[in-house]
Amino acid sequence: MKLKDKLENHYKAFGKSKISPDPLEMLHIFENDMNKEVMGFISSIYAYGNIKQIIRSQEKILMSSEYNPYKFILNLSHKDENKLSFITHRFYTGNDTIKLFRTLSYIYNEYGSIKNHFLKYYTQNDKNLKNAIEGFSSSIINFLIKKKALTQGTRFMFPLPSAGSACKRMNLFLRWMIRKDELDFGIWDEIPTSKLIIPVDTHIARICKELKLTKLNNVSWKMAEEITDNLRKFDPNDPVKYDFAICHIGMRKLEF
């Protein structure tokens, strides 16, 4: 079977019924787009390490925000921050969690949404979202520096393509927001799916090397672009649609 046919078959097989375990499933409890956006952003930032640990952190955040993270962040108070101080995740401290929520509160009160802030750095003529991610994440890092809130943890939350990072978590969030099918939400419809870059982690890298979608050995922005460019040959308008299936085949140790 040709690689394109395999990719299409896996894409169709890994629909909503196969979503678990994945950080994305927690976003499907919401009907409100603002809750999907903010919970998606937070979930992507915490999407590293063991999947059970990621879902536990998501559950703690949902409980702390009384299952309305948008309202919680919009009206963030010192009392609310006390609830967040107990939320740790690998090398994110409770203090890092508070700093993230303060930053999000600023973004929502200043710009109305993460999307509005991100679109400040997006240009239609760009080949992909590299420059937009760079500008968006740099602006948040500068905000954290200004507020004396840049720590090892908060710095890790916002990697930069210019530093060589594959920016897996940011690309994952953008996939959730921009693509639309039964998994992803498509609520950022100002940006075409053709601009997305695949979120590369060790699972994606291993399988894509086996499929000869990349010649590179180290996970990096360059690898993410190379894999996406090769997937674009199979679907130029939506190359990242194969991401969920490839990732879960790797996670579940299935044969491709």
Image: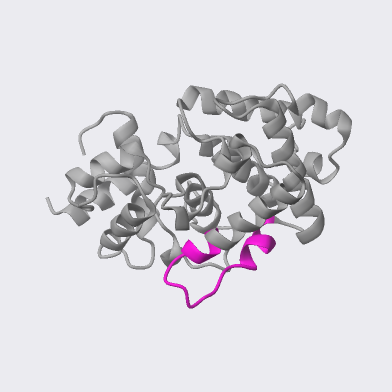
Note whether 17 is above or below 131 in the view shown.
above
Which residue is depicted at the point 52% across and 54% down? Answer: 174
Between residues 240 and 96, which one lies in front from this camera angle? 96
Q: Magenta segment, which residues? A: 114-133
Which residue is depicted at the point 59% across and 42% down? Answer: 155
**Going by the image, does 165 lie left or right of 73?**
left
Which residue is depicted at the point 33% across and 47% down? Answer: 12
Q: Quadrant of residue 5?
A: bottom left
What is the image's colouring?
Answer: one colour
Is residue 125 covered in magenta? yes
Q: Which residue extends farthest bottom?
A: 125
Q: Position of residue 103 (x, y in %)?
A: 73, 46
Between residues 181 and 55, which one lies in front from this camera angle? 55
Q: Position of residue 46 (x, y in %)?
A: 56, 35
Quarter that holds the C terminus: top left
Between residues 8 and 171, which one lies in front from this camera angle? 171
Tell me if I can see residue 66 in this picture.
Answer: yes
**Going by the image, does 31 lie left or right of 163?**
right
Q: Which residue extends farthest left?
A: 1
Tell me if I can see residue 28 in this picture.
Answer: no
Number of numbered markers: 0
Between residues 11 and 42, which one lies in front from this camera angle? 42
Is residue 249 covered in magenta? no
Q: Quadrant of residue 123?
A: bottom right
Note whether 253 is above or below 161 in the view shown.
above
Q: Position of residue 187 (x, y in %)?
A: 60, 58
Q: Position of residue 41 (x, y in %)?
A: 61, 45
